[in-house]
Image: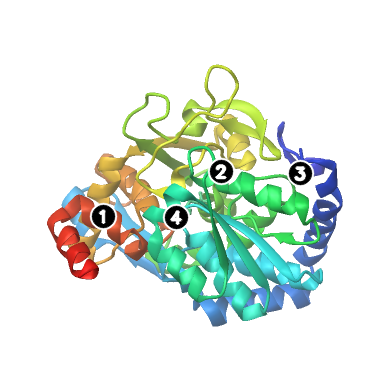
Amino acid sequence: MNGGGYFGRYGGCYVPEVLIPALEQMAQGFEEIKSDPVFLEEFYTTLREINGRPTAFTPLPRISEKLGGARLFMKNEGLNHTGAHKINHCIGQALLAKRLGKKRIIAETGAGQHGYASAAVCARLGLDCTVYMGRKDYERQRPNVYWMELLGAKVVAVDDGSQTLNDAVIAAFKDWVANPESFYLLGSAVGPHPFPAMNTFFQKIVGEEIREQCLTETGKLPDYCLACVGGGSNAMGIFYDFLDEQSVQLIGVEAGGRGMQPGEHASKVQRGVEGIFEGYHSYFLQDGTGNIAGTHSVSAGLDYCGVSPILAYLADEKRIQFESASDEEALAAVQMVAREEGFILALESAHAFAHAFKLAPQCSPDEVIVINASGRGEKDLFITMRHFQEESLLTYAQYLLK
Ligand SMILES: Cc1ncc(COP(=O)(O)O)c(C=O)c1O
């Protein structure tokens, strides 16, 4: 990182004047806690007590045999409390908020996993929590809305724009501008400095655990690490510890959606244009006039127009390769992992698996592919059920309406 939160020319802190003191206080707090043994002890203890870390490093023997080629493993972040990796950075940020004397948390959410994790951590730490969610996500990820409300959070459905994550982020920033004494607990490695570096710091435990687990299990480091890419927090979590290991190939998998026409996907590194939006400089999906373009993905968590400035920099440096998987490929991966290995993946994570399934047969049997299973798929019940068993969904809906 250069000074001021820049990664090459990406990153930075482009926000209204009113937020500068809050972000400076946060950045200062982050600098202090990074090397504060008391904070770090509390962070790692909480990860152990709430999430049961380390999460499992699980071989996928039946799929490996079926595909031929490399041995496949998954890092099961779906085993975290609330069902995804998001809670790692929620715990870190909420502990920092407490240390800074904050009483109120603002968060945005797409798939609902970041909101659900924020609500849970805020309930545990006695913090007031307001979560913004695009109306489309509010409807399609309804189970998570219910959990957030049960945990005492206020969930605000956002009716602006495409009613997805981007609109939720904008609404959360508006709240922060009106209430700069609140703490914005941001859900990915995006946004103004210090969020990209801070969330990467809180997520890097994923790769650190994999290093040890993979050595124990296979006697070597992974040959490939794969992660899906929404904003980039689970990807930075798995990649960070291996950035200096040139033998480990790092692959980020973006949402290919329904095709590569504008508005039909969310592949911002591969199809985006440089710009400054939501407080940071990175790649964004834009229409020809410099406005933000529509996005689409079957997975709410990847349905976002921007990407971490750290990933943008590492893509330019050619340290991380970027690929896409379509909605159909992700759904097929959910089914394959369920049938062959007994795990229900989050639709987001399934994008990384879909690409791994194309890669594995091209590898030799001594090669090891590790995929970040960033979340579990119960939240996607009504989406995957509509796809795989529409009749059952309709019968269930009729039963509920009786
Ligand atoms: C399970 C899961 N994986 C991945 C993502 C994408 O976010 P990120 O790219 O920040 O990991 C989300 C976002 O909601 C998610 O819920």
**SS of the residue under disc 2:** helix
What residue would you read off at disc 4? 138
Q: Confirm if mark 3 falls within 8 A of ligand 1.
A: no
Whether the residues at callouts 2 and 3 have beta carbons within 8 Å, the answer is: no
Which is closer to the viewer, label 4 or label 3?
A: 4
Q: Looking at the image, which is closer to me, 214 or 183?
A: 183
Whether the residues at callouts 4 and 2 have beta carbons within 8 Å, the answer is: no
Q: Is residue 228 visible?
A: no
Instruction: First in sequence, mark 4 or 2: give its number.
Output: 4
Q: CA distance from mark 1 to mark 3?
A: 39 Å
Q: Looking at the image, which is closer to me, 374 or 164?
A: 164
What residue would you read off at disc 2? 167
**SS of the residue under disc 1:** helix
Q: CA distance from mark 4 to mark 3?
A: 32 Å
Label number found at residue 384: 1
Which is closer to the viewer, label 1 or label 3?
A: 1
Q: Residue at x 30, y 41 (%)?
A: 327
